[in-house]
Each structure stands twice: as C-alpha cells, then as structure tokens.
Image (cartoon, rainbow, N blue to C red):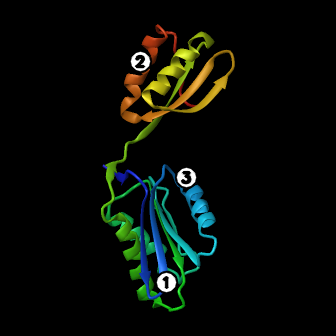
Amino acid sequence: MAHTLATTQTAQLEIRKSRFIAHAIPVADRDAAMAELRRLRDEHPDATHVCWALLAGGQSGMSDDGEPSGTAGRPILEVLRHHDLDGVLAAVVRYYGGVKLGAGGLVRAYTDAIASALLNAPIVERVAQARLTIEIGYPDEARVRHWIEQEGYVLADSRYGMTVRLTVGLPASAVDAARGAVRDLTQGRAGFPAHG
C-alpha cells in the first residue's frame, strides 16, 4: 500500500552560510507538482537553486536545477523512496551563502534537508482515485449535484447535450456504492457510460 503525506511539510537548515528550505508537498500528479514548483519559484525569486524530486504513481522525475549532476535531485528522490512515499513532490530551495560545499557536501545537505522535513511527517495511506461518469436527465441534475457535494466528491467534468453527463472523482473503493446511491436517487434513471 502506497503512502503519501497528509499535509505539506517544511524544514530549514543552514549549512556553511547556505540556506536550504525543504518542502515535501502531497500532489496528485506531475501537473500538480509543476504548479507547486512554479509557486515556490515565485515565492523565492532570489533563490540560487530550486532542486526537486517527484514520485507520483509512475510519474517520477527530478532536477538538479543547476547544481552539479547527481548532487540534488537524486539524493532527494532516494529519501522519498526510503520513506516509501508516493504522490509527493520534494523540493529544496537553496540560497547560496558563498562557501562551496563540494559534491559530497551537497548530497548530504539536500538529503538532510528533505529528511528533516519528513522527520515527523503525518503519513497517510494513498487512496486510489477513480472516475465515475453519471448520465442523467436534466430533472435529476440538481439532486445528483447535491449528493456529490454531500459526499465530498470532486466534480471533475460536466457536459450538457440531450442528457447531462457528470464526471465525479472519488475513491476507487466507493464506486460501487456510488452507483447504487445514484440509481436510488434517480429511481433507476441514471446511466453510467464508460469513459470516452
């Protein structure tokens, strides 16, 4: 069972005048991770480097962002792997303080920074998400939308044609129950077309 973080974790280390600010951020996928990276770069316009690693369901990636190859992204990725995390972007913002750390020093610094952010991090099971498309007539739309809100599911897409198609994001384990609930709500009028 994969694990992810309940909330964003941060830590800050100062190593020989350089400041390392580590962020471990739960993300759904690569797109969400890239958005978080842009936000970090906007928040730290004067940072020397923003190095990162991502593990998200097969969408992994890393960047040394100008540090010597292999001294930042890979060590950060190794820490995530060691913690058996998925759906996490780990990014370390570095402000250079004028003292060179050398390759070994950099590997240690980036490893320590992200490890300290994860030290007491609340870890949760990563719940597999699924999508369910519900096809209904216009008279049932308000009722089904209200049910989606009550359940706390995410309305991912809505399309209007001869019928209404609502695509809902929900835990994979809840799909069967959701189908049953929507059938009951609409007295059997709802359909569940395959994606496409």
Which is nearer the eye, 94 or 135? 94
The quadrant holding residue 105 is: bottom left
The answer to whether residue 140 is above or below residue 151 is above
Q: Of all residues shown, which one is farthest toward the right? A: 161
Q: Which residue is mark 2?
A: 181
Secondary structure beneath dot 3 equals: helix
Where's residue 181, x and y in %? 41, 18
3D distance between C-alphas at marks 3 and 2: 31 Å
- Judge left or right: residue 77 versus residue 99: left
Which is nearer the eye, 10 or 193? 10
Which of marks 3 and 1 precedes in the sequence? 1
Q: Which residue is mark 1?
A: 18
Q: Amino acid at mark 3?
A: Ala
Q: Which residue is mark 3?
A: 32
Question: For the point 59% across and 75% down, which residue is it?
Answer: 47
| Closer to the eye: label 1 or 3 | 1
Where's residue 12, x and y in %? 43, 72
Question: For the point 56% across and 19% down, which residue is it?
Answer: 135
3D distance between C-alphas at marks 2 and 1: 56 Å
